[in-house]
Image (cartoon, coloured by chain):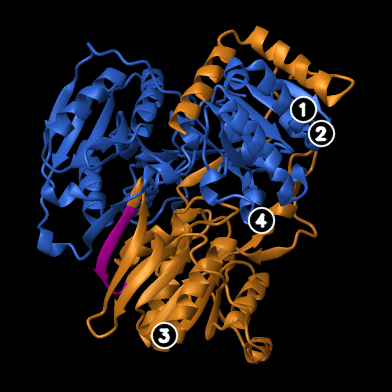
Chain colours: A blue, B orange
Amino acid sequence: MTEPATSRPAGRPVEIDERIAAYKGVWVFIETERGHVHPVSWELIGEGRKLANTLGVDVWGVILGPQGEANIAAANEAFAHGADGVYLMEDPILAEYRTVPFNKGLCNLVNTYKPEILLLGATTLGRDLASAVATTLATGLTADCTALAIDLDTHSMAATRPTFGGSLLCTIHTLKARPQMATVRPRVMAMPPKLSDRTGKIVNVALGMQEQDIITKVLDYIPDRNQDQAQLAFADFIVAGGRGLGKVENFRLVTDLAAVLGAEVGGTRPLVQGGWIPQERQIGQTGKTIRPKLYIAAGISGAIQHRVGVEGADCIIAINSDPNAPIFDFAHYALVGDAMKILPALTEAFRNRLSVNRKTI
Amino acid sequence: MHVVVCIKQVPDSAQIRVHPVTNTIMRQGVPTIINPYDLFALEEALRLKDQFGAKVTVLTMGPKMADQALRKALTFGADEAILLTDRAFAGSDTLATSYALSSAVAKIGQTDPIDIVFCGKQTIDGDTAQVGPGIATRLNLQQLTYVSKIVSIDKDARQIVVHRRAEGGVQVLKTAMPCLITMLEDTNHIRFGTMADAFRAARYTLTEWSATEAGVPDVTHCGLRGSPTVVKKVFAPTAKTVKATPIAGDTPESLSQTLIDTLFSAHPGLQEDLESRVASNSQGA
């Protein structure tokens, strides 16, 4: 039986399986900006390692950037986190992120060395680059995955992500194109252990572009003043509110509890849309993914949109008046009741229990 | 100056319900809206109309009923509206969608050359942020994602300077038009349309293009056939096997005491962690 011609994207060779079999190995794009590696890169190396072990292949990191000692340090970090090798593309053109040279560099590497899987962080840079690369290579890209696995029947990557505005999960495969691409948001995957005696190979590859051929120029870079930015993704303690709080005035109860705990404050998407909290404090699929030691959710029903953003928390305490709220399916402690009454009581109780607070009063 | 705004009609996600037994989306009766992120793109385009007299064309791909989204965009002040609709587009993933849309954008540009294509940052139903960059890549437009501000436009030199949100900072980028911009949220507020625009929108005859009419070169690149990604499974998340520990109490106060007792005995070290966190906070303050 031959495949019906219609099931094959035009312009591809008939020997589709042979073509796919030529792609081997798991790659992780190591995101560097101004010499700083985004930690999502290491989380992805950890996840890529698991996929590679199932497939019996190697994990390679890809670093694109200007010449410098920082690249070797980043490569060594990649080895320590589980990479077997690193493709290193150094060129002054790559000093600041721009879509065109990064897209060309990464596509050239893929076309030369043919990885079967390519993972990138779902950051502003990673999403911008992944979309351009997947379009250039005419391959499948699944955004914001919350779980990655290998389907042994099809030898393909099963990429799971929330769908339909976060009410369901779906598993997506790329069967007839390579590489299989996915982005994963920071903090979704656990940081792998670091073994500093691991080593690996570094392969240098040239970009082969001229600056005058690149139309977009970076005139300036204005760093954020860190103090102004909520550090939700890396906070150990977080208190958040949802629509169950009723009105914006009640959000103060969340802030009060957070102050006593030394916690960061967050909220759900409806609260951002309602203007209660800024976007940078949104927790969930389209906001921040968090992995705190303690997470207290008040008046949050727990839609998948929110769930996937908080499941990495060590301990989740949920306060909700609806005993059937989905948040109780994944919380560790369930407080069924009126958040407007429980939050002030909880604030007082923590204030009395934590010795530091007692001393300062 | 001619700008094209790509919009999408999406179900109002706040009102989507999942059938508890079949796990299917209950779409019946769910109102549709213009993807909220696209409104920031549309408003930015309309500001170029105010400033430079730019012509604003809105484009969407979807079923026939997506004409409602286009008509809504016209009430805000868009000049022309084109609906890309064809059974061949059904089941498109982001790669197939950017293929169809880029064909239509190219066709629009044949009669009236385009300076800027605007898209929203992402949609609220797909949340991929892949279609905008896909269109830019296919049409070789300079790609400017997550733009928080258009700083300046030099119409004669066909150059544009924008602020682009990056990790940990803002890039100031200068590039040449034509370019594709995806607007960041909360960068502007969609205007109230005028009565004149509302009347014009009601009377306006939408342009409707099939794949052939849009100049799509190869329909096998469209729809399900042209989509490299395959959705194998849609499912509701399972509850954790270990149920949440219920914390009860006669009053909020006793409930809070029980919770803290349970919490600190089950998580030794947590109290100390919290205390050192609070201590370091008060030192910093």
Distance Cα–Cα, label 4 vs label 1: 27 Å
Residue A90 in the figure: left or right of residue B105 = left
Q: Quick one: quadrant of the N terminus of chain B? A: bottom left
The mark nearer the N terminus, 4 or 2, is 4
> Mark 1 packing: few (<14 Cα in 10 Å), some, or many (20+)?
many
Picture layout, residue A251 above or below residue A44? below
Magenta stretch contains residue A159: no
Q: Are marks 2 and 3 in contact (CB under 8 Å)?
A: no
Distance Cα–Cα, label 3 vs label 1: 55 Å
> Mark 2 packing: few (<14 Cα in 10 Å), some, or many (20+)?
few
Q: Residue at x 51, y 68 (%)?
A: B188
Q: Which mark is residue A274?
A: 4
Check disc 1 and report the residue beneath it: A345
Foreground residue among A91 and B278 = B278
**Dot 3: chain letter:** B
x%, y% of residue B128? 49, 50
Which image quarter: residue B142? bottom left
Which residues lie in the magenta part? Answer: B170-178
Residue A170 in the figure: left or right of residue A350 = left
Q: Tag 1: residue type?
A: Ala
Q: Which mark is residue A341?
A: 2
Numbered disc 1: secondary structure: helix
Check disc 3 and report the residue beneath it: B51
x%, y% of residue A355? 60, 15
